[in-house]
Image (spheres, rainbow, N blue to C red):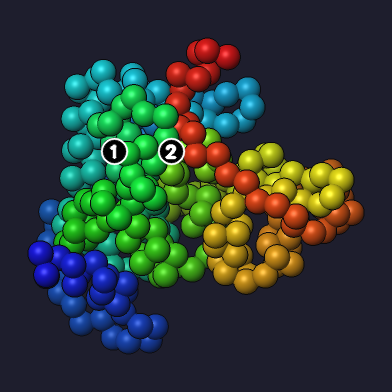
């Protein structure tokens, strides 16, 4: 247990050498290659992610929970990361960690379904408790987000890549992240979120923004002014004009209710 804890805490340092440092680690064996093109995850996403008329994607957790075959496929996909070489700071490994985070989150919800929120049954949430073996170490969802994706890549687009199974979270895409299209797809995800009321809404008093931009303000430039500049980078022309007219964040909001496709059937 001590060794596993140490590996989690030191993951960024051990998996990602300092810039300019020579990488003398042995190369991984052939069997530690990443799941090829994340095809299995894409198949599951296409089958169970449902897009609503509001532009928000929701997950058919009930359908996945009822399918032993697809649950086994999800388990197998996740298991493929156990000894994979995830050490290089590449688009391929960013995609791998983000896909793994999302797949483990979906599996966690399916295993507890039905629930109203990912936070049900927890004081603050499951992110430190839900763990998976990846890159040769046991890591939690919390570690994947904060010690790997945020610490190593350090780009605001991290927040559009991972999904916390909640209404106010950026969409879970209907296909896996892939290195070849990563920049384009992250750009599209950022635009979709910021141009949705979940991202930012302009009111008579100013901007109402997602709590993501409050919790992780440092990732978006470290100030409210920088956050607004980030909005303007991705906002459609009509929204950008409104933001410039009211360039002040007055409130943050976040809805933790489950992004459950069952809600689409009721509406």
Name the residue at 20% across, 47% down.
Answer: 80
| Residue with the most extreme front position | 123
**SS label for mark 2:** loop
Which numbered marker is on residue 176?
none
Residue 46 percent coordinates (x, y): 41, 28
**SS label for mark 1:** helix
Name the residue at 57% across, 69% down.
Answer: 218
Is 158 situated above or below 198?
Answer: below
Residue 137, by quadrant, is: bottom left
Q: Is residue 197 left or right of residue 146?
A: right
Residue 203 or residue 171, whichever sits in front: 203
Which quadrant: the N terminus?
Answer: bottom left
Tags 1 and 2 touching, CB below 8 Å? yes
Residue 69 percent coordinates (x, y): 20, 23
Which quadrant: the C terminus?
Answer: top right
C-alpha gap between disc 1 and disc 2: 10 Å
Q: Is residue 212 left or right of residue 241?
A: left
Is 103 situated above or below 133?
Answer: above
Is 223 situated above or below 45?
Answer: below
Q: Is residue 92 visible?
A: no
Residue 26 percent coordinates (x, y): 15, 74
Which residue in the structure is indicated by mark 2? 165
Sequence order check: which comes first, mark 1 or mark 2?
1
Q: Is residue 99 left or right of residue 233?
A: left
Which residue in the structure is indicated by mark 1? 108
Q: Is residue 266 left or right of residue 102?
A: right
Q: Dot 2: few (<14), some (14–19), or many (≥20) neighbours within 10 Å?
A: many
Residue 118 or residue 239, whichever sits in front: 118
Q: Is residue 25 visible?
A: yes
């Amino acid at each position: 247990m001590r060794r596993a804890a140490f590996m989690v805490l030191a993951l960024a340092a051990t998996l990602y050498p300092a810039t300019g440092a020579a990488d003398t680690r042995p190369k991984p064996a052939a069997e530690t290659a990443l799941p090829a093109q994340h095809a299995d995850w894409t198949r599951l996403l296409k089958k169970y992610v449902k897009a609503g008329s509001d532009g928000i994607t929701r997950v058919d957790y009930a359908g996945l929970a009822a399918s032993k075959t697809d649950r086994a496929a999800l388990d197998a996909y996740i298991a493929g990361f156990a000894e994979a070489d995830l050490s290089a700071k590449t688009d391929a490994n960013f995609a791998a960690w983000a896909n793994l985070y999302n797949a483990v989150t979906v599996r966690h919800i399916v295993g507890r379904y039905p629930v109203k929120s990912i936070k049900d049954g927890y004081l603050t949430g499951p992110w430190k408790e839900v763990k998976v073996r990846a890159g040769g170490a046991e890591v939690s969802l919390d570690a994947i987000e904060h010690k790997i994706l945020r610490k190593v890549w350090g780009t605001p687009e991290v927040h559009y890549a991972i999904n916390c199974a909640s209404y106010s979270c950026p969409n879970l895409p209907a296909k896996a992240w892939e290195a070849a299209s990563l920049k384009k797809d992250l750009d599209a995800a950022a635009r979709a979120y910021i141009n949705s009321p979940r991202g930012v809404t302009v009111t008579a008093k100013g901007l109402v923004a997602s709590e993501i931009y409050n919790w992780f303000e440092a990732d978006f430039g470290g100030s409210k002014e920088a956050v607004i500049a980030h909005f303007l980078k991705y906002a459609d022309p009509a929204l950008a004009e409104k933001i410039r007219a009211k360039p002040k964040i007055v409130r943050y909001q976040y809805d933790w209710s489950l992004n459950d496709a069952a809600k689409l059937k009721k509406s």
